[in-house]
Image: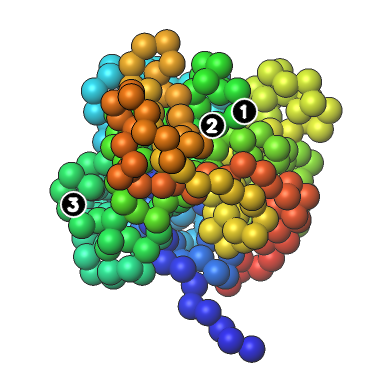
Amino acid sequence: MTQYAPRKVIYDTDPGVDDAMALYFALAHPGIDVVGVTTTFGNVSVEQAACNALYLTAIANRDITVTRGVQSPWVKPGEPPPDFIHGADGLGNLPSRELTSNQLDPRASAQFIVDMARAYPDEITLVAVGPLGNLSLALKLEPQLPVLLREVIIMGGTIDEPGNVSPVAEANIWNDPHAADHVFTASWKLTMVGLDVTHRVVTELALFKKIADHHRHVATDTLHHAVAFYSTFYSGLHKHLALGPGCFAHDLLAFIYLVSPDLFQTESGCIRVATEGIAQGQTMLNRRAYIDYPQFGWGRHLPATRVCMQVDAGACLDLFEKTLMSDWLTA
Ligand code: BDR
Ligand code: CA
C-alpha cells in the first residue's frame, strides 16, 4: 500500500471555539502535519487568539510554532469581538487554565507564512479560518506566494446560503472585506468552504462529551467546555440546533475538505467581495464567465475559486468522531 507523507499545513486562525475543534482535528489526523499556527484578530483580539493557540497546542502536548498577526482590518474600523458566541476568552470562558510554557515566535504571522512558503516551495497548504488580513499581507510581502504555496483553503463567505452577520455576508469576510477581495483575486489554487456547506453539518454537544469521557484529558475537557458555551448560543438562534443541543463546526470543514475533498460538491468561478455599503462582506460568484459584463471589476482574466456548495454531512461527522476518538493525545 502506498504511504503518502502528511500534508504540511499552516493554520491561520482566530481561536475561537470552532477554530479549536478544527485544530484538534488537524492534530489528530495522520494526513495533516501542522507546521505553524498563525493568529489574527476575529473571534477575539489577536493577543487573545495567540494566547489561545499557544494554550491549545501546549495542553495537547504539541510544541508548534505560533505567531501573532494582524490586529485590525486593512481599511474598515474593527468590529467588537463576538464574546456572546465564543466567550470573552474565545474558549467559552474557561474557569481556569493549566500552567504551560510554550512561547510565541517573534515573527509576524505574514512574515512566517512567507518564510515557510519560500523554505518549502509547493509544499505548504494554507488553511485560513479567520479574517484574511495575514494572508493578504503575506501576498503584499511576497507577490510570488500563489506559486510558492501548494494550495489555500479558506473557511469564509457564502453564495446561496443566507449570511451570519447580514443577510448576505459571512463573519470572516465581513471582518476584513478588503483583505478578502485581495485574496480572492490572486492566482492561488483556492477553495472556499463557506456557509453553503458549514450550515449543513451540525455537531452535537453529546459528541464532545463522548470524546472527553473517552480521553479524560485536559485538551478534550477544554474543547467540551468551549463547545458547551458555543452550543448555547447556536441553540438559541436556530430551532434545529436546540434539539441536540449542537452547533455549526464551521472551521472544521476546511480541514475535512483538505483530507476528504470527495465529500464535497463544488462549483468554480471568480469571486469578488463587496467592500462597502449595506452588502459589505458579500461574496459574489460569477456563474456566467462567458459574458463580458459592462460593470467594471468582472473581467475574464480574473482567477477562479473552487467553491464548496454541497457536502455529505454524515460522512464528515463520522470522520470527525473517528479521528478525535483515535489515540492522538497519547502518541
Ligand atoms: C466563522 O466566523 C467565526 O466566528 C468562526 O470561527 C468561523 O471561522 C463562521 O462564520
Ligand atoms: Ca474562525
Q: Is residue 204 above or below residue 12?
A: above
Verify CB contact (< 8 Å) between mark 1 and mark 3: no
Q: Residue at x 33, y 68 (%)?
A: 122
Q: Residue at x 33, y 24 (%)?
A: 294
Residues at marks 1 and 2, CA–CA distance in whole angstroms: 6 Å
**Residue 289: image location, x then y, percent:** 44, 40
Horizontal placement of 174 versus 119: left or right? right
- The residue lying toward the viewer, choosing from 316 and 103, is 316
Q: Residue furthest bottom?
A: 1
Q: Residue furthest right?
A: 243
Verify CB contact (< 8 Å) between mark 1 and mark 2: yes
SS type, badge 1: loop
Q: Which residue is mark 1?
A: 161
**Residue 315: image location, x then y, percent:** 75, 55
Q: Which residue is mark 2?
A: 158
Q: Which residue is mark 3?
A: 143
